[in-house]
Image (cartoon, rainbow, N blue to C red):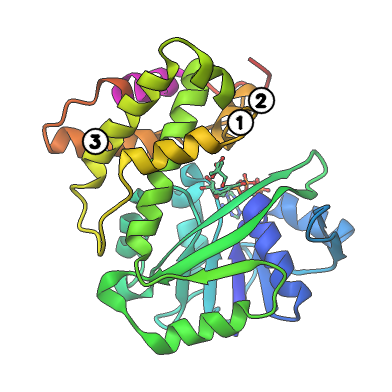
Amino acid sequence: MRVGIVGAGAVGGYFGGRLAEKGADVTFLVRPNRKKRLTEKGLVIHSPIHGNSHRSVSVVTPEETAPPFDLLIVAVKAYHLDSVIPFMQTFSDQHTMILPLLNGYAHIDHLQQAFSKDSIFGGFCFMESTLDQSGEIHLLGKHHRLVYGELQENANHARMDQLKQLFADANLEAVQSDFIETEMWNKYQYIAALSGMTTLMRSEIGAIRDSTYGSELYQQLLNEIYQVTIRQPLPKPPESPDIIWNRVQKASPQSTSSMYRDLKQGLPIETDHLHGSLVRWGKEANLSLPILTTIYTGLSLYQPSGSSL
Ligand SMILES: NC(=O)C1=CN([C@@H]2O[C@H](COP(=O)(O)OP(=O)(O)OC[C@H]3O[C@@H](n4cnc5c(N)ncnc54)[C@H](OP(=O)(O)O)[C@@H]3O)[C@@H](O)[C@H]2O)C=CC1
Ligand SMILES: CC(C)(CO)C(=O)C(=O)O
């Protein structure tokens, strides 16, 4: 199977690198600067738990040509999705499977409109991975789990078997899900609340939980997000705010979110995709979402500056 990884960043670089390590036929779809780095220095992964890796990899830029890929794994930030769609269209055909790993859910609809509806899989990942200044990948914790599955309307076991074989024996944890929409929304609920609270409070999770009204506010936010979530057509019920709050309580006090880290560095953030979409869906359903709307409004006023707050 010819696999194209769209975006050789913290997520795509990591999973693509692990697949290449196992001998899969992997090519990274990148922009010219990333191509230069990868060609000169190779793809470097640092992981104290799962092992380091340094290898040469195949890359392709939008100006080049290559036959269509069998699978495109999409790992760009949501605000770059529009710019990669033409790039993906150049390197795909009607048989290409598309597996996005972005946080959130609005990108699914977007991809289904740009490609054939049944080519799009559901997917997401649990990991804490970053790129350093030289473009090397650092997996910070032990998690490197990728969850994927056919969206309800598409169930096709032959394709699922192909993906299972691709991920088998790679140095990553791949989980096939029969309820991928619900699982994506469970992660979405968790990350929308975590990124919203840590960025609004400019704090780690422990300090928020310990503040006088922090826990109360956090749970109210989870309730608002849940009101939007339960209105989605999901194959099984989503996790309730209590279950997610339980997880938040168990998280280490130092936990933050990648959005908080991006904000601190003055980088662009995915708030329109994560919080804005929830607010828009909620307003369509006439829901009152004061905390979510405050978070989204505050974050949409933020201007990336490239420097620390
Ligand atoms: N990092 C993490 O630990 C986690 C991230 N996620 C989610 O995964 C998604 C990806 O995040 P992450 O990997 O961290 O993001 P990164 O910013 O690390 O990587 C995104 C990559 O996309 C590339 N890209 C952007 N536009 C294009 C383009 N037009 N053509 C080719 N490549 C392009 C960038 O390339 P360039 O180098 O040229 O800028 C960059 O390398 C997000 O939705 C995030 O929320 C989910 C769970 C954990
Ligand atoms: C849930 C978490 C913290 C790690 O997967 C994440 O997705 C993020 O910070 O963006």
> What's under tag 2, amino acid-wise?
Gln
Q: Is residue 138 above or below residue 211?
A: below
Q: Residue at x 30, y 77 (%)?
A: 154
Give me the C-alpha separation between circle 1 and circle 3: 24 Å
In the picture, which quadrant includes the N terminus? bottom right
* Secondary-structure class at tag 3: helix
Tell me, yes or no, whether the two marked residues, 1 and 2, touch with CB atoms within 8 Å: yes
Front residue (pair 298, 31)? 298
Residue 55 is a magenta residue: no
Q: Is mark 1 within 8 Å of ligand 1?
A: no
What residue lies at 36% left-to-right and 20% top-to-bottom? 216
Question: Is the magenta region chiefly helix, strand or loop?
Answer: helix
The residue under the point 84% across, 63% down is 53
Quadrant of the picture in which ligand 2 is shown: top right
Q: CA distance from mark 1 to mark 2?
A: 5 Å
Q: Which badge, 1 or 3, comes first in the chain's sequence?
A: 1
Q: Amino acid at mark 3?
A: Arg
Residue 300 inside the magenta-drawn segment: yes
Q: Secondary structure at mark 1?
A: helix
Which is nearer the N-term, disc 3 or disc 2? Answer: 2
Residue nearest the viewer, comparing 158 with 204: 204
Question: Would you say the beta carbon of the disc 3 residue lies within 8 angstroms of ligand 1?
Answer: no
Q: In this figure, which residue is indicated by the disc labeled 1?
A: 262
Percent from the top left, x then y, of residue 194? Answer: 47, 33
Secondary-structure class at tag 2: loop
Disc 2 residue: CB within 8 Å of ligand 1: no
Mark 1 packing: few (<14 Cα in 10 Å), some, or many (20+)?
some
The residue under label 3 is 280
Magenta residues (range): 292-302
Q: Which quadrant would residue 32 be assigned to in this image?
A: bottom right
The residue where tag 2 is placed is 265
Q: CA distance from mark 3 to mark 2?
A: 28 Å
